[in-house]
Amino acid sequence: MAEEAVTFSPVPYRRTWQAVKFVTPLLLLVVVWQVVVSAFDVNPRVFPDVATVLRAGWETIADGSLAAHVGASMLRVSVGTVIAILTAVPLGIAMGVSKGVSDFLTPLFRFFSVLAGIAWIPIATLWFGYGFGAITFVIFNAVFFVVAYNTLLGVSTIPMPLRHAAASLGAGRWQMLTHVLLPGALPNIVTGIRTGMGFAWRGLIAAEMIATNVGLGYMLFLARDFYRTEVIVFAMIVIGLIWLTLDRLLLAPLERATVERWGLVQRT
Amino acid sequence: MSAILTIWGAYARWTQRWPALAAFVPFVPLIALWWFIAWLQIFPPVFLPGPVEVVQTGWELTWKGILPDYLADSLARLTVGAAAGMAIAIPLGVFVGLNRKAHEFSWPILLFFQAIGDIAWLPILLVWFGFGLTTMTFVIVYTVLFPVVLNTVLGIRSVKPELRRAAQSLGASPTRILFEVTLPGALPNIITGLRNGLGYGWRALIAAEIIVGTSGIGFLMFDARRAGSVEEIVVGMIVLGVLWYIVDSWFLAPIERATGQRWGLVTS
Amino acid sequence: MKSLALENLVKTYFDPYRGLQFTAIRDVSLTVEEGDFVAVVGPSGCGKSTILNMIAGFVPITSGRILVDGREVREPGPDRGVVFQSHALFPWKTVADNVTFGPKMRGVAKAERAKIADEYLALAGLSHAAERYPAELSGGMQQRVGVVRALANEPDVLLMDEPFASVDAQTRMTLQEELTRIWEERRPTVVFITHDVSEAVFLANRVVVLSKGKVLEEVDIPLDRPRSWDRLVEDETFKALSNQVLQLVRSA
């Protein structure tokens, strides 16, 4: 194969170029928004223009309320998710070790993972009262059941030859766990975390609308009470940006790194 | 020990003959455990009712006609919303999936609007449409829309180029290729998207019913929360879980399997 | 079945990720007469699959011309049937529906299509599998379906892109013998791409050795037909020809 070097070499700019390609349509959307709002003279109660939203956003940043809301939401998500992962993964692995046990428990975990999240809000507020406890519980259980179910699934789909190979190479129980079961189930675990956090994030917003006095969901709902559409729109953008960042820059690359690298699952 | 093994063996034989059993039997010990804990009264009955009380309440609600009415309301909202969502999402996904320019332009926008999340739209929808059916329908359409669009796009783009080439060199026109190759190839992904979309959709419905609050299972649960009737909350959760379990495992999952597995497109 | 001519084909690629310009094919000319069987061999990366993809119309040519029965072709079309290495059967269609896909696109009526399916499935010995899905077949059976699907559309030229490369050695020999039998019966015009020298010598009337995007040499294979492995495996002429082609490929 003949290869001739040419002067144009786009390699170093590829990441930047991708980022530009990603952001451009979003900026265009902002332009369209402004044009439509001023061209049709939309009532600011219905939909405010870009400048009003930016001003409202700046106000919430300046008086520190945005930081308080975001901080409260992120704290709940982090605490709930971390506890859920720390408990769900060991449980899922323990249950997945025997095929009989995992077959038996699968329907139970499917049942609870389809129920996970929002449906627990009423009973969570009854158990824990309004506030941090109830919301963190909703997030915890949204992540917990989905992750446990996926871990169970992951462990039970590890090919038997792999376990046999490890055993005949002299792996003990602990080594089997750390070198075969955990890495083998990891792609499923990561997928579970991503799905579970998707449910948790929505559950968080819903729970904060209902059961607290600080947080992004509360910020949205409070603004609605005063018909401050510009604050609502600003909060929605913040919510969108936070989740996009979490999902695309943290969870999706993690999932790709495990799933695609190892070629364990061919479907995305 | 041998008694356990005998029971286990009998269970294995029965479930082999009637696989549907495996979906029910695991719940028996769980319910027994629940009954036992409630009977011990470790937690006060206002927090954790026993299964008997819950069944009684459920029967009462059914007999009075409240539960069937609310269930019908919720299901009707979900069906209408999901149908409308798919009617928009599939053509849009096909268009975006086939057109490279449209894909580059709309992908970030789709991701961003998916990231905002259905529930965050509730406050502004309440400002626009008030407390009513429009708001709830909008939320469900919105929720179903994005997973279906994103998965349709993925499905269309994951159809192997050889299949299109094969169809071309067998004389198929572009329209024929769309209907004979591209759409069937994307179908498993479309169904996965629908499954995810409905999963998010009915969670959004619960949240909307809690917050908008006129009727439906979500309203039933939150109304019970206000009245402090924990039995009714649990009835609502069980109805939701059972309902979704039935829809998902007897309806959506079999379709997914039938297309994906017989065609050999899904390997996991 | 009609003739095929390649005139001064050139293909250059630009690889945007590496910022490099490749020349995959530099000036290839080749004529395949009607009813001839030509195999193209060469080491991997010599451009043999690129040539096939250009004939099929899947990748645009940089310069030169491709003529089928005297007409210049640029797009994919039913006049050039293709058999793919990865079989490329439609997973959601049964074997019979895969085989009659081409006729269906031409608007052939259902009853007529059923006859076509019967005929071609019998030719490949697959009558029992008509209603099965591709995923339910073995690799060898999938390739047989791929071959008769292309044949059932009655193309002018049959293009085969390493169709037997991904099946086991036993099955491969059976498939080669079956392809020979079908060719001897029907005499389609075939261009067969492979990296397996003995496969090329066994099947073809002429073997074209490709190297670095150019034709290194053309070797005629004057072996008697019908051919079978039982007879040829100890045949001196076959051995000598295989050896000659192998030396050319290794020097390439």
Image (spheres, helix red, strand yellow):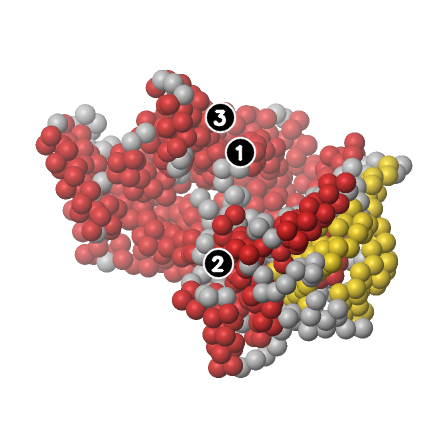
Return the residue nearer the eye: A203 or C46: C46
Query: Tag 3, which secondary structure?
Result: helix
C-alpha distance separating marks 2 and 3: 54 Å
Can the viewer see residue A251? Answer: no
**Other residues around mark 1 within 10 Å, as few (<14) / some (14–19) / many (≥20):** few
Which residue carries the number 1 mark?
A262
Report the amino acid beneath label 1: Trp
The chain that hosts pointer 2 is C
Q: Are marks 1 and 3 on the same chain?
A: yes
Q: Are marks 1 and 2 on the same chain?
A: no
Residue at the extreme front: C236
C-alpha distance separating marks 1 and 2: 30 Å
Which residue carries the number 2 mark?
C141
Disc on res. A78? 3
The chain that hosts pointer 3 is A
**Quadrant location of residue A170?**
top left
Can the viewer see residue A257? Answer: yes
Query: Mark 1 against mark 2, which lies toward the viewer?
Result: 2
Q: Quadrant of the C terminus of chain C?
A: top right
Q: Residue at x 53, y 62 (%)?
A: C178
**Other residues around mark 2 within 10 Å, as few (<14) / some (14–19) / many (≥20):** many
Q: Quadrant of the N terminus of chain C?
A: bottom right
C-alpha distance separating marks 1 and 3: 28 Å
Q: Residue at x 19, y 56 (%)?
A: B63
Q: Are marks 2 and 3 on the same chain?
A: no
